[in-house]
Image: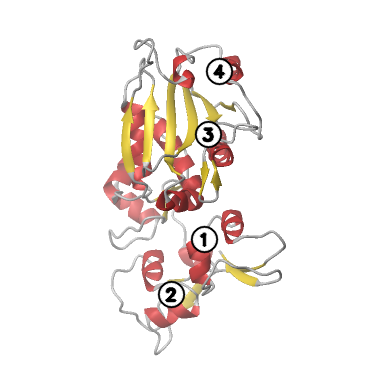
């Protein structure tokens, strides 16, 4: 695999970037970059970061690090991560004058599939020399393929909430966009369903037939739910052996009563079990979500706990019937 990736975490150290709604840009870009780095690393793709700590970098040093990591321009992608501000909403991508728009399109399509609003992809020319890029991270990283990704507006409450809850997903979206752009099919076992996916589009992505995809996942219908993990390689699993949290339907049970008993929703139960109706039969086996108990410690917030357990603040609130974001030490919370 010839692809090499350099990830730039915007700002850092004394340069905090923009801030608002509980987000500091330099911290969020570093969180996104670390997630992205880990994803590329798992795939065996050579990947480097301009900074992996809260470090001050001048534009010259930042570009020098990019060039120090990679000596050849062949199949090198530079991704500079940023968070916008200024009253807008949604994600946008800026790409270098020397490159085409395809990678930027891919990135925005993937982010849209994860529910983020999309603004535009574009190029920006220098004010003194229109033949050069306005932004140094694009201008001074020739001949690499370079993009600046603005994931949303931190001064917009909708975007800020999405960024806090979904930054890991957004990082993986960009990884997927790069792989698709380079024509690389990753050897992964599971795929997470995104908005707009169909069984056909997923099967095509992983060189499967729809029937094979359904068989791998014990599916009896074509129903998909966003966020569901589908097996896309390996052997078919026996669901009764691979998942311990199985509930057997008894007389009088309904989807609502079972969902309530297991701190979930009817829609979630139906998605987990690939069922489209509310009809149940006695003795039927249903997969139900399992939860652990977490004891709140000093300094904990709903956001930090959600991040620790790869869930969302809204999910924690719903799961624990909370009416506010206030927590107290030694409080017990259900977590995935």
Distance between the Cα atoms at labels 4 and 1?
Answer: 37 Å
Q: Which residue is mark 1?
A: 313
Q: Which residue is mark 2?
A: 285
Dot 4, crowdedness within 10 Å: few (<14), some or many (≥20)?
Answer: some
Residue at 28%, 50% (x, y): give it: 198
Distance between the Cα atoms at labels 1 and 2?
Answer: 30 Å
Q: Which residue is mark 4?
A: 63
Determine if residue 315 is in view: yes
Circles 3 and 1, Cβ within 8 Å, touching? The answer is no
Q: Is residue 307 above or below residue 298?
A: above
Distance between the Cα atoms at labels 4 and 3?
Answer: 21 Å
Q: Secondary structure at mark 2?
A: strand
Relative to residue 174, is residue 29 drawn left or right?
right
Dot 2, crowdedness within 10 Å: few (<14), some or many (≥20)?
Answer: some
Please tell me which residue lies in front, 83 or 38.
Answer: 83
Distance between the Cα atoms at labels 2 and 4?
Answer: 57 Å
Residue at 29%, 49% (x, y): give it: 196
Of the two numbered discs 4 and 3 on the same chain, state the one appearing first in sequence. 3
Please tell me which residue lies in front, 327 or 99.
Answer: 327
Q: Which mark is in front, 2 or 3?
A: 3
Q: Secondary structure at mark 3?
A: helix
């Amino acid at each position: 695999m010839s692809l090499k990736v350099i990830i730039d975490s915007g700002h850092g150290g004394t340069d905090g970037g923009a801030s608002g709604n509980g987000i500091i840009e330099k911290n969020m870009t570093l969180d996104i970059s670390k997630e992205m780095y880990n994803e590329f690393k798992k795939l065996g793709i050579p990947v480097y970061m301009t900074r992996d700590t809260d470090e001050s970098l001048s534009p010259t040093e930042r570009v020098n690090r990019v060039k120090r990591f990679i000596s050849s321009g062949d199949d090198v992608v530079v991704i500079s991560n940023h968070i916008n501000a200024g009253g807008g909403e949604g994600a946008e991508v800026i790409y270098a004058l020397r490159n085409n728009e395809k990678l930027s399109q891919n990135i925005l399509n993937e982010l849209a599939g994860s529910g983020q609003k999309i603004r535009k992809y574009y190029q920006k020319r220098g004010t003194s020399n229109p033949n050069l890029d306005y932004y140094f991270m694009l201008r001074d990283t020739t001949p690499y393929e370079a993009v600046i990704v603005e994931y949303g507006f931190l001064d917009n409450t909708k975007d800020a909430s999405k960024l806090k809850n979904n930054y890991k997903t957004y990082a993986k979206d960009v990884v997927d966009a790069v792989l698709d752009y380079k024509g690389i099919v990753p050897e992964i076992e599971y795929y997470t369903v995104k908005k707009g996916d169909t069984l056909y589009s997923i099967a095509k992505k992983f060189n499967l037939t729809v029937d094979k995809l359904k068989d791998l996942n014990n599916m009896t219908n074509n129903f998909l739910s966003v966020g569901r993990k589908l097996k896309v390689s390996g052997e078919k699993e026996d669901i009764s052996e691979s998942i311990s949290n199985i509930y057997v339907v008894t007389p009088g049970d309904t989807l609502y009563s079972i969902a309530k008993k297991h701190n979930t929703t009817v829609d979630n139960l139906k998605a987990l079990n690939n069922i489209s109706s509310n009809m149940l039969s006695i003795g039927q086996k249903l997969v139900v979500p399992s939860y652990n108990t977490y004891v709140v410690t000093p300094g904990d917030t709903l956001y930090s706990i959600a991040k620790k357990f790869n869930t969302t603040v809204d999910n924690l609130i719903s799961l624990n019937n909370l009416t506010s974001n206030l927590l107290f030490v030694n409080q017990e919370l259900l977590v995935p």
